[in-house]
Amino acid sequence: MSFRTTIAAGVAAAMALGMGTAAAANDYPTGTINWVIPFGAGGGSDRLSRMFASEAERHFGGASLNVENHPGAGAVTGWQHVLNQPADGYTVFNATPTPIITLLSEEDAPIDPGDIEILGYLAAFASVLVVREDEFPDWDSFVAALQERPITIGGTNALLLGAANVIDQAGAEAIYVPYGSTGESVTDFLGGHIDVAAVTESTALTIVPENGIALMNTSSIALPDDVNEALGNPPMATDLGFSGLAFPRWVGMHPDTPEDVMARFAEMFEAAATDPEVQAAFEAAGEPIIFLDRAAAAADYEAMVRTMRNAIGLLQ
Amino acid sequence: MSNWWRSNQAIGLYLVLIIGALFAYIWFQPWTHRIMRDGFLLGMMPMMGLGLMLLCAAAMLADPLRRETPEPLQDARPSDAWLPVVMLGGVALCFWAMARLGFVLAAPPFLLAFMLWFGLRPVRLAILLAIVVPAVVFAFFTTLGVRLPRGVLAGFF
Amino acid sequence: MQIEAFYDALALVFTVQTMFWLLIGVFLGVGLGAIPGLTASTGIALMLPLSFTLDITGALGLLIGLYKGAVFGGSISAISFATPGAPDSAATVYDGYKLTKKGKGRKAILTALYSSVTADTASDIVVILVAPTIALLALQFGPTERLWLMVVAITLLGTLSGRHLAKGMLSAGIGLFLGTIGADPVSNVARNTFGQDWLRDGIHLVPLVIGIFAMSQMLDQGLELLRKTRKGQQVEKSTKDLFGKSSEGLTFREYLSCWREMGIGIGVGTFVGALPGLGATVAAFMSYGIAKQAFPEKKIGEGSIHGIAAAEAGNNATVGPTLVPLLAFGIPGSATAALIGAALILQGITPSPRMFSLHAEVIYALFIILILGNFANLGIGRMFAFVYARLGQVPGEVLVPIIMVMAVIGAFAARGDPADVYMMLGLGFLGFLMRRVGIPEAPLVITFLIAPLLEENLRRALLINRGDWGGALFGSALGIGLAGFAVLVLVITFRMNVGNRLAQIGHEEDKNGK
């Protein structure tokens, strides 16, 4: 780096710092907060983000929420976009585990999963293992069978990570069969071509009880009571002494954002996510809010990245 | 024989060279020979595609149709290659401008330039169409709920 | 039949909105289909982003209406200007254009319309009666069986390769190579991305289809405009007859006299349509070829309405059956079915056999829309066919730049990823070069769609069978049966010389096409 660019960078940084804190201390937020999602328009994440933006906007101190789609590169493009924006609290990143899995799958990833400050979870879905009752009536018989013969588990990449994580901790091995969509894996499960389907709780509800039982919820976060009941109260990973893996819809910001801005945002986000009206809207859309505040979410995120880093090796 | 370079055999030769170079590039990539957990090489399917292409290109060197010249190439000129590139460049420029200025500002100059280039006369008609068509398209898509890039005019819509 | 779901479906379909979008779809379809270069798949790809914003029946009405309209619409420009609006109406050119030159263009267009609608309705009824049964059988299809189904589709590629087999297979190789770009299906590790992160998601189908089909056409036509070749002028006179009041219509007796050709079209179209990987173009040529062989006394090829009936019945009869593999197996049998499948997925419904139990009302709604679409096609086709033919008369100087802009919007709007637009432009150039050296595009698109599915299923079958190739390939009776069928297709293709015969027709298509 030449002398001139060093000075220029220094001046820019000083200006950014000075202006950032000055603006933050007084009147964050005003104007528009850009709500970046790393997926295209029309998908599930897009629908939920837009719903959140319209339902919860009034909790954000008069600022308006503007959903921006930045799809591409295994959902990493959006993340890079956020890191390229000024760290002023006006760009929020709302993602799922997809970009994290992408980053951990690459040998030289452009950014690290830690390059974000987690400010809360909006929801968390679980990987539920669904089996045929006559084959594996409970978890213990399943583990015993795993020791004896190879057992095939099908699901999308993320959900297989949840399965691989607990099975590895149980000291067993299985054959993980990746599918592009849950529809395909469930079709193969119903046709008897695979032994276990790793599915989200909402998919599990369409299989249980007619065509199978929920053997185990591999998540670290509990399901809502009514869902748990409908699935026949499957044991959770943590009940059996394992560390579970939840798949959050997380919300974060550029790590260089001033602390008071982040604290203010986390507060507003909590107020929005715990508002009964907002929750009712999400409930009606079939995607209930499972809120985790900043501290809990940050802790779970860190554990999740660590667990995934390990589990991804099992799937490569 | 003077026109050999347009024949299927010649095309086969160009293709063998291009595909061969691509194959060599893929072959020397570090990821190509990485073994996945199911025993497959990461580069197996790409190499199969290239292998099939290479085989077919090589077949073109020797098959019964090798002396034939494809019809569209019989009176081909060098401008057949670069004019499409210019057109694509124009379209790419239009899209680049669209992302910044918005659809309504970027499309008319492009349409006008291309209509005149393709020989539409009188100029008045071209100007009229270049203004009316993007407006109609934008209005149509907006009514249907598809958001086209708004660019600098974002505040006005 | 689940009568409740059927009632739900009626309530979903018979709304002002659904009817509106169905009519709009057919209207746009006939219009787009009549514009050379815009095929059913291009039209659907362009309209897909719009369909995301509609409810499920509105989206299905729009897309299926557009599909039906476009497959018929292609015949309008084939008959009027000897320029097929889409590859699948290329077989219509032979007889249709000769009739136009005789001043019987109106008769020709009406023959095309009535035989299209007749065959479409008949094949839809077959689909409705048979699809639920297939869905029950479909659960038998695991990775092994699906793998062989893909192999069957690939073996049929030989018939699509045109006269020069090496070029057809080369095109298939390009499709296979492009299809492998992106994350590996088993390990999720990036491969073949040339070190570019933005290629990690692979090439998306919409920019591929728009680039290879629409953009490459426009480059070709733009070049022609700059060269000012003389084509076109001579046709102008004859199209005037279309709009003249004096020109001859089609009598009911003449329509009935085409029953054998329509029967052939329905049979061939339904079968070919239901098989993954073929489609309307092959069906039209096969139907045309069979009719020509079977009834030499009808002078098909010399300006006979029977030739039009065979070709148009053949291509429209594939419309409903194309959806059977999608509904029964979740496997798109054609680019168009893949786009309709994408629309379903974006509505939260993954095409799979379980659709029949999970979303029965959607299936019934789809069936009702399939049938209603034919009536819409008949009405709109009749009212507007002659007016719409004027769209083909819009001078290329105006049309080509507008379609270029539409291609950009279509590629961008599908996902909102700018990389898709540049990808579309690059593929447009690739398609242009392929046209120039006589490499057909169809095998590329088919392997691009099929090869990744083939790979996924092969590797899943191998994982399930712990690396045992014997078990993975021949682990079930159904798998062995399908493998046998694939071999049979290959043997028939070579023995009976079907490939050669189709190739001849395919070559004539190249000549007569643009």
Image (tube, helix red, strand yellow):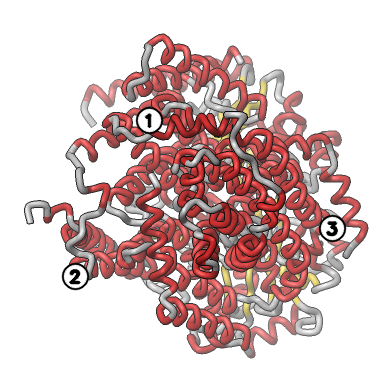
- Residue C66 placement: quadrant: top right
Query: What label does residue A15 carry, if any?
Result: none
Q: Amino acid at mark 2?
A: Ala
Q: Chain of mark 2?
A: B
Which tag is nearer the camera, tag 3 or tag 1? 1
Which tag is nearer the camera, tag 1 or tag 2? 1
Q: Amino acid at mark 3?
A: Val
Tell me: A253 left or right of C197.
right
From what the image shows, is residue B120 above or below residue A257? above
Q: Are marks 3 and 1 in contact (CB under 8 Å)?
A: no
| Residue matched to label 1 | C233
| Residue matched to label 3 | A227
Q: Are marks 1 and 2 on the same chain?
A: no
| Residue matched to label 2 | B62
Residue at the image point whose x is 84% and y is 39% from the top: C15
From what the image shows, is residue B87 above or below residue C482? above
From what the image shows, is residue C385 above or below residue A128? above
Q: Amino acid at mark 1?
A: Gln
Q: CA distance from mark 2 to mark 3?
A: 67 Å
Tell me: B105 left or right of B56.
right
Q: Chain of mark 3?
A: A
Q: Nearer the viewer, residue C288 or B82?
A: C288
Q: CA distance from mark 1 to mark 2?
A: 41 Å
Q: Chain of mark 1?
A: C
Residue at the image point whose x is 74% and y is 41% from the top: C58
Q: Nearer the viewer, residue A14 or A137?
A: A137
The answer to whether residue A238 is seen in the rendering is no
- Residue C126 placement: quadrant: bottom right
Q: Considering the numbered disc 3 on the image, is that residue within a helix, a strand or a loop?
A: helix
Q: Nearer the viewer, residue B7 or C474?
A: B7
The answer to whether residue A287 is seen in the rendering is yes
